[in-house]
């Protein structure tokens, strides 16, 4: 009779094999963009998992299939060079993109958790940017120095709120590669301690992506407050 240790080890090994076999690495990007202006649709992957694919189309319909280890930034493009582009993320699963070319950048993208996270982040930053622009316009039109000072103070508060929003987003989305991109955007603003805390709060899966490993290594080389900008430039590349 097999002892308990052998049974446990065999069970553990079978579980690992099962998890490996069931790991989803296949992706599909499909849909239809009415009014597509060219005979070819290009899907250009950038970031961690680069690649270029293309399909012929007669009515704006397209479908791309492949394998990928995790989410990566990508663009749906009309031409390989100097084409009109729609930003998205390619990741395991089925992603559908539908809409009209007349509003190409606003077409509907479904099935991509990373892209949904990106939209949340973008909406928050755009809201703060809109308020900042309104205040800046008021400052330009004002002739009152005290009012201008108050407006500038409000703008400073919005700038701080923007940074706080980024930090909170990262904390709220530890499993998202979008949080890694946001850490890069903060690398010239925050000191090493805060950046490390944000990075360490991410899931191991995110930290072990190529970008995650690169950011982790770069942060380790930051000499606290000294040299933060230089090391951050490395992070951003």
Image: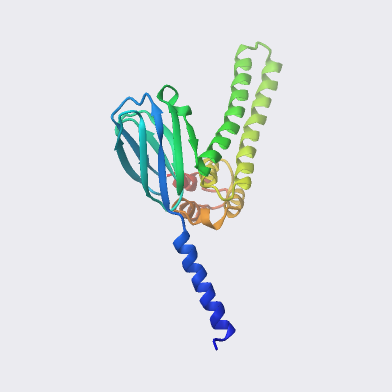
The image quarter in which residue 96 lies = top left
Nearest the eye: 11 or 157: 11
Q: Is residue 220 above or below residue 114?
A: below
Residue 22 position in % (x across, y down): 47, 60
Q: Quadrant of the N terminus?
A: bottom right
> Looking at the image, what colour scheme do you see?
rainbow
Query: Could one spot residue 19 in this view of the protein?
Result: yes
Q: Is residue 116 above or below residue 129?
A: below
In the displayed image of the protein, which residue is found farthest to the bottom? 1
Q: In the figure, is residue 195 to the left or right of 42?
A: right
Q: Is residue 93 above or below residue 43?
A: below
Residue depicted at x 46% and y 53%: 214
Q: In the figure, is residue 171 to the left or right of 42?
A: right
Residue 74 position in % (x across, y down): 41, 40
Q: Quadrant of the C terminus?
A: top left
Residue 153 position in % (x across, y down): 68, 26
Residue depicted at x 67% and y 21%: 151
Residue 121 position in % (x across, y down): 57, 37
Residue depicted at x 33% and y 36%: 42
């Amino acid at each position: 009779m097999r002892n308990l240790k052998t049974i446990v080890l065999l069970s553990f090994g079978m579980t690992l094999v099962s998890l490996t076999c069931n790991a989803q690495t296949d992706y599909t990007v499909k849909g239809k963009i009415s009014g597509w202006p060219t005979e070819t649709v290009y899907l250009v992957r950038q970031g961690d998992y680069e690649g270029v694919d293309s399909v012929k189309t007669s009515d704006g319909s397209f479908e791309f299939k492949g394998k990928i280890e995790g989410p990566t930034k990508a663009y749906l493009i009309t031409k390989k060079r100097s084409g009109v582009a729609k930003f998205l993320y390619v990741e395991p699963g089925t992603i559908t993109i539908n809409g009209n070319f007349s509003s190409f950048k606003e077409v509907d993208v479904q099935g991509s958790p990373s892209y949904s996270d990106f939209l949340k982040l973008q909406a928050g930053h755009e809201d703060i940017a809109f308020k900042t622009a309104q205040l800046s316009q008021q400052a330009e039109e004002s002739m009152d120095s005290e009012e201008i000072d108050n407006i500038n103070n409000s703008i400073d508060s919005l700038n701080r709120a923007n940074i706080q929003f980024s930090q909170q987003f990262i904390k709220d989305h530890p499993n998202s590669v979008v949080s890694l991109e946001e850490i890069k955007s903060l690398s010239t603003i925050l000191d090493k301690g805060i950046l490390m805390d944000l990075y360490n709060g991410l899931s191991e899966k995110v930290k072990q992506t190529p970008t995650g490993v690169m950011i982790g290594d770069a942060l380790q080389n930051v000499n606290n407050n000294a040299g933060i900008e230089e090391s951050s430039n490395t992070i951003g590349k």
